[in-house]
Image: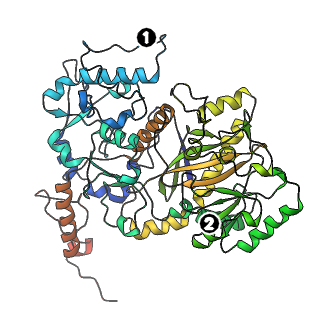
């Protein structure tokens, strides 16, 4: 699909490094490049990084990763739901296990255990020397400093061991911190940060924050090295009622042929009379789901399937609950595409690194979530949530829920990978390209609906353009005609790893995103000193550029006089 000039669409390859980091740390040079002179904190940072070159001519040897398993010291979050209790069994292996033969098939869990054992033995020597490895990604640009390297448990060992630089434990304790809100502390996020060398903190000295939506004023205090997982104003698509209002506005501006993907929605209680008129028509029609104006009731700000139910008549609506709290009524898609008789939807992931210009990075893997009861027509079946709803939080309670037990088998059970769905489409001569183009079209147009709102708030509250980034989980339903319908967008998508398949997809997703945004270590003490210097220079009228130094390091230099002033001439009065 051809992407508009206002957006950049980058696809991540599953398990590979992100090749396009233009929306992350690389692109923010014009915002604060003057702060990174050779006399600034960039030089001091180099003092804490060394490359261990061997006798073979200077190629860096691998150094230990910060999570190298040491018996009971293995991070518990790395093992949630997969091979519980097996980690640490390789602690007494004799030597370094060799990579498995190419022709020998081993499960993902076995390969993960072998990688752990390799790293543990190979890095033991450096751990004894008192060093703690923090891997860094070198920049493609000479003027840029390296960024922290994140990796998942599912990457090949050879990829993990290349070109390692390290920071001593003392430097690491000062420079690398993460802040994760307890309400969204998912194991794959916490584990990935821990493996990269980030230590959790509850202070404001963090490098990266993963949490719930902050207030607008929270953005003002951030420094250029801190990364926060939200943009101000994105709640305008995170709430279902706000999402509908913005899409309706764009529909009026650009026509229904462009914004075709949002089911008709009523905002309650304001639109109650309009909804009643729609539902009253059902009394004149046969009790057939496809001919009825069925509507699905949803709370505007809830998640995980909470408060969702179907209605056919006005009497089916919980009036008391509707009066207490706002809700929406969205037209039910009654002709969904079925696989083996089951309804399903897609959970897609996209990362935004900038709204001005709009930069969208669409992850090419995702989840296909199935209902646990076969789809049937009939008015008496509208109360069967296991038939009509595909939310994992609901269907896991069904006795027919089929949990995935092997990450390598991604096309069975109640949850598939997006790649498995693509294979199913291609094997059955179904138009996958049409579906994928529709997904990208929906994503871009939805984000364009809040572009002006977010850009306005960023200009007011965000001082540094690389500070904010955001991960979205958006849910899409496919109908029998291969039309796509946007159900909702989550600005804090669940990264819960309830199965090996979830763990594989979400670990790779998280490591790709964190590498994309570019977390750069820095010296907090030096940064505080230079901030103080910058304030003094601004108050005294000195040149504000830290790069424009002469003489003693850190000494402010007055702005150069104009050519007329240098020659001794005075400006004439007008």
Residue underneath mark 2 = 327
Residue 370 place in picture, x, y as percent: 64, 39
Residue shown at 76% from the left, 57% from the top: 294
- Look at the numbered disc 2 and give the secondary structure of its residue: strand
User: In the image, which disc is placed on residue 416?
Assistant: none
Sort mark 1 into few (<14), some (14-19) or many (20+) by Cα contacts within 10 Å.
few
8 vs 268: above or below: above
- Residues packed near mark 2 inside 10 Å, few (<14), some (14 to 19) or many (20 plus): many
Residue extending furthest toward the left: 552
| Quadrant showing the C terminus | bottom left
- Residue 329 placed where, x, y %? 68, 63
Side of 60 where 481 appears, left or right: right
Identity of the residue drawn at 17% across and 44% down: 171
Note whether residue 349 is visible. yes
Q: Nearer the viewer, mark 2 or mark 1?
A: 2
Residue at the image point whose x is 40% and y is 53% from the top: 183
Vertical order, 115 against 403 (above or below): above
Distance of mark 2 from mark 1, alpha carbons?
57 Å
Give the colour scheme of this rendering: rainbow
Kindly check if marks 2 and 1 are in contact, taking CB atoms under 8 A apart as contact. Answer: no
Q: Which mark is residue 101?
A: 1
Whether residue 567 appears in this view of the structure is no
Taking depth in this image into account, of 315 and 20 the one nearest to the observer is 315
């Amino acid at each position: 699909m051809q992407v508009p000039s206002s957006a950049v669409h980058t696809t991540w390859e599953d398990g590979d490094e992100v090749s396009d980091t233009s929306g992350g740390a690389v692109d923010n040079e014009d915002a604060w490049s003057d702060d990174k002179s050779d006399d600034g904190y960039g030089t001091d940072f180099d003092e804490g990084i060394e490359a261990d070159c061997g006798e073979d001519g200077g190629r860096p040897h691998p150094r230990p990763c910060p999570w190298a398993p040491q018996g009971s010291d293995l991070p518990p979050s790395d093992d949630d739901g997969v091979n519980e209790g097996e980690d640490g069994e390789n602690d007494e292996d004799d030597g370094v296990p060799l990579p498995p033969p190419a022709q020998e098939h081993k499960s993902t869990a076995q390969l993960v255990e072998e990688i752990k054992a390799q790293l543990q033995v190979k890095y033991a020597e450096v751990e004894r020397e008192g060093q703690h490895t923090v891997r860094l990604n070198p920049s493609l640009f000479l003027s840029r400093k390296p960024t922290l390297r994140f990796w998942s448990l599912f990457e090949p060992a050879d990829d993990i061991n290349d070109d390692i630089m390290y920071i001593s434990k003392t430097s690491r304790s000062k420079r690398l911190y993460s802040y994760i809100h307890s309400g969204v502390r998912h194991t794959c996020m916490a584990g990935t940060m821990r493996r990269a060398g980030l230590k959790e903190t509850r202070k404001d000295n963090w490098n990266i924050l993963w949490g719930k939506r902050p207030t607008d004023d929270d953005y003002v205090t951030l420094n250029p090295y801190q990364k926060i997982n939200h943009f101000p104003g994105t709640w305008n698509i995170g709430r279902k009622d706000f999402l509908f209002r913005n899409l309706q506005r764009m529909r009026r501006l650009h026509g229904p042929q462009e914004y075709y993907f949002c089911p008709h929605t009523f905002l309650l209680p304001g639109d109650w009379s309009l909804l009643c008129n729609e539902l009253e028509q059902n009394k004149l029609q046969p009790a057939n789901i496809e001919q009825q104006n069925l509507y699905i009731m949803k709370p505007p700000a809830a998640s995980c399937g909470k408060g969702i139910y179907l209605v056919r008549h006005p009497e089916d609506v919980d009036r008391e609950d509707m009066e207490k709290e706002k809700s929406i009524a969205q037209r039910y898609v009654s002709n969904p595409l079925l696989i083996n008789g089951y309804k399903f939807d897609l959970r897609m992931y996209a990362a935004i690194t900038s709204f001005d210009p709009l930069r969208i990075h669409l992850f090419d893997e995702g989840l296909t979530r199935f209902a646990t009861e076969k789809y049937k027509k009939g008015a008496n079946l509208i109360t069967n949530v296991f038939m009509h709803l595909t939310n994992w939080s609901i269907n896991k309670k069904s006795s027919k829920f089929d949990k995935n037990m092997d990450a390598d088998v991604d096309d069975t059970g109640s949850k598939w990978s997006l790649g498995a769905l693509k294979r199913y489409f291609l094997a059955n001569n179904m138009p996958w390209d049409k579906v994928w183009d529709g997904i990208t079209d929906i994503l871009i147009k939805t984000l364009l609906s809040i572009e002006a709102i977010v850009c306005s708030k960023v200009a007011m509250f965000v001082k540094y353009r690389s500070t904010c980034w955001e991960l979205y989980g958006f849910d899409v339903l496919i109908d029998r005609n291969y039309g796509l319908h946007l159900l909702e967008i989550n600005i804090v998508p669940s990264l819960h790893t309830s199965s090996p398949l979830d763990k594989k997809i979400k670990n790779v997703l998280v490591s790709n995103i964190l590498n994309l945004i570019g977390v750069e270590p820095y010296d907090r003490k030096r940064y505080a000193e230079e901030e103080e210097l910058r304030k003094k220079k601004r108050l005294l009228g000195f040149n504000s550029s830290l790069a424009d130094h002469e003489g003693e390091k850190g000494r402010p230099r007055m702005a150069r006089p104009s050519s007329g002033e240098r020659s001794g001439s005075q400006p004439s009065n007008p």
